[in-house]
Each structure stands twice: as structure tokens, then as C-alpha cells.
Image (cartoon, grey):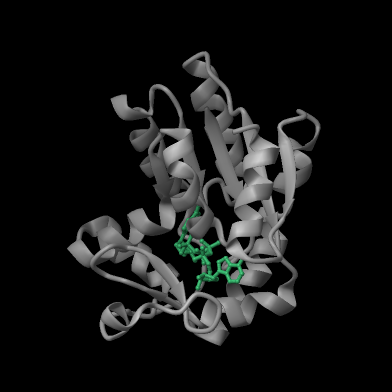
Amino acid sequence: MRVIFVGPPGAGKGTQAARLLERLGTPHISTGDMFRAAVKAGTPLGQEAERYMKLGQLVPDAVTIGLVRERIAQPDCAGGFLLDGFPRTTPQAEALEAALQADGVAIDAVAVLDVPDDLIVERITGRRTDPETGRIYHLRFDPPPADVAGRVVQRKDDTEEACRTRLALYHEQTAPLVPFYGDSGRMKRVDGVGTPDEVTARLLATLGL
Ligand code: ADP
Ligand code: ADP
């Protein structure tokens, strides 16, 4: 199955992707994770991406599209994938459609996680990640256990200021993907408010998993 997760920053895309992977049995492709890995490795791609990421801006389409095209061409993606955080702009969505069409395949479902703006800042500023496992926690909503709490890290772009920039860009550049996919019947809106378990149950039902 080829699935896309769309949603504002902090909507729970990464959290839900980790929970659905076993059922989906496909690779999880998070462009944010790929860029963070490139930044950590100090590659030229990472150096370029970091300039945008730390300000909460989008990495240019040409860079991002190239990265994803390469990734989905890998053999492990032949049976499907879960794209998390891509596409984020209409040109990215168009490029993805063209790449898949050339391979004779298509996106099966676009799950849009709806979370209102007023909940986003708290979700983002309280987000912490375990660098050893990649597991995402929240200081209030999903606190790390005592043996993990000492090592969790906060993303550099999870400041209130960068979060507001990302949220504004979401409304300006990513929200238009809803009408882009809307006509095709593949677009599924899922309420992202509630406990992570509640949201997982909604996603499983919506995707028919
Ligand atoms: P969040 O989990 O808060 O939605 P991500 O981890 O998906 O954020 O992305 C972090 C940053 O990486 C973005 O703010 C942006 O700078 C960059 N990025 C990730 N995906 C894309 C994309 N599809 N297009 C452009 N930039 C991206
Ligand atoms: P995204 O990948 O969309 O940016 P994350 O999955 O990283 O979002 O979640 C952002 C933050 O919100 C994390 O700290 C996560 O623990 C927390 N979170 C995720 N889902 C929920 C939920 N349903 N209710 C409350 N907090 C949540």
C-alpha cells in the first residue's frame, strides 16, 4: 500500500507512522528524519537543509523532490511505503504523481491528520526524542520513562518561533494539497485530537487495515 501522511507540524504523523508500520509492512519515509540524518552526518545536503530547517522554512522543492525520488526507487519500496511529511507543496505532489505514473503505480490513500492550531504549539514545544531508539515522547502527554528521561533531546526547530513559521507555511503551502488530492477519492480526513491510541484506531479504520 502507498500511503501519505499530511498534517501540520506536531499533528502526530511520526507518532502514528511508528504505530502503523507493522500493519502496513512498508518502509516509513520521513523527509524530516532524512534531512536530520544528513545534518548530523554533515553532508552537503545536510548543510543546505540545515539553513532552512533551523528557521522553520521549507527546504527547496528541487532538493526535496530529488531525495524522495531516489528513496522510493529503492527495492524495499516496490511493494509500498508510508510517506510522512512529503509532499508538502503542490510541486512536490505533482512530481510524486509523475514519478509514480511513470512506474505504473499510484498513491492508495492520503491521510490528513487534522489538529487545530491552538493545540500545535504545546505539542511541538513539549516534544522530545530518544536519540537511541528514535521514539517520540511528549513531556506532558506521553512522558518518557525514568530510564529514558535523562537522555531525551529536543529538536532545534521545536521553538515557539520556528513552530509558528512552520504552521503558517503549512496553511499557505501544504493545506492546498487537500483540494489537490480531494477529487481522487483517496483523501481521508482523520481527527488528530484525542489520545494517540484513539487516533491510531481512527487511522486503522479509515485505511481499512
Ligand atoms: P514536523 O514533524 O514538525 O512536521 P518534519 O520533521 O517533518 O517536521 O520536518 C522538519 C523540517 O524539515 C521542516 O520544517 C523543513 O525544514 C524540512 N522538511 C521536511 N520535509 C520537507 C518537505 N517535504 N519539503 C520541504 N522541507 C521539508
Ligand atoms: P509530527 O510528526 O506530525 O510533527 P509527532 O508525532 O512528532 O508529530 O508529535 C508531536 C508531539 O505531540 C510529540 O511530542 C508527540 O509525543 C505528541 N503527540 C502525538 N500524538 C499526540 C496525541 N494524540 N495527543 C497528544 N500529544 C500527541
Residue 42 seen by the camera: no
| Residue 69: percent from left, percent from top | 40, 34
Tell me if residue 139 comes above or below residue 109 in the rendering: below
Image coords of residue 54 (percent x, y)? 42, 76
Is 162 or 33 nearer to us in this picture? 33
Quarter in which the C terminus is drawn: top right
Quarter of image, res 53? bottom left
- Left or right: residue 96 compared with residue 186: left
Identify which residue is drawn at 52% across, 27% down. 1
**Residue 24 coordinates in the image, percent (x, y):** 48, 34
Q: Which residue is drawn at 41% across and 33% down?
A: 25
The quadrant where residue 165 appears: bottom right
Q: Which residue is drawn at 66% across and 58% down?
A: 198
| Foreground pick, 90 / 197 | 197
In the displayed structure, 29 sits above or below 191; it is: above
Say which residue appears at 23% left-offset and 67% top-offset: 132
| Residue 41 coordinates in the image, percent (x, y) | 18, 62
| Furthest residue toward top | 104
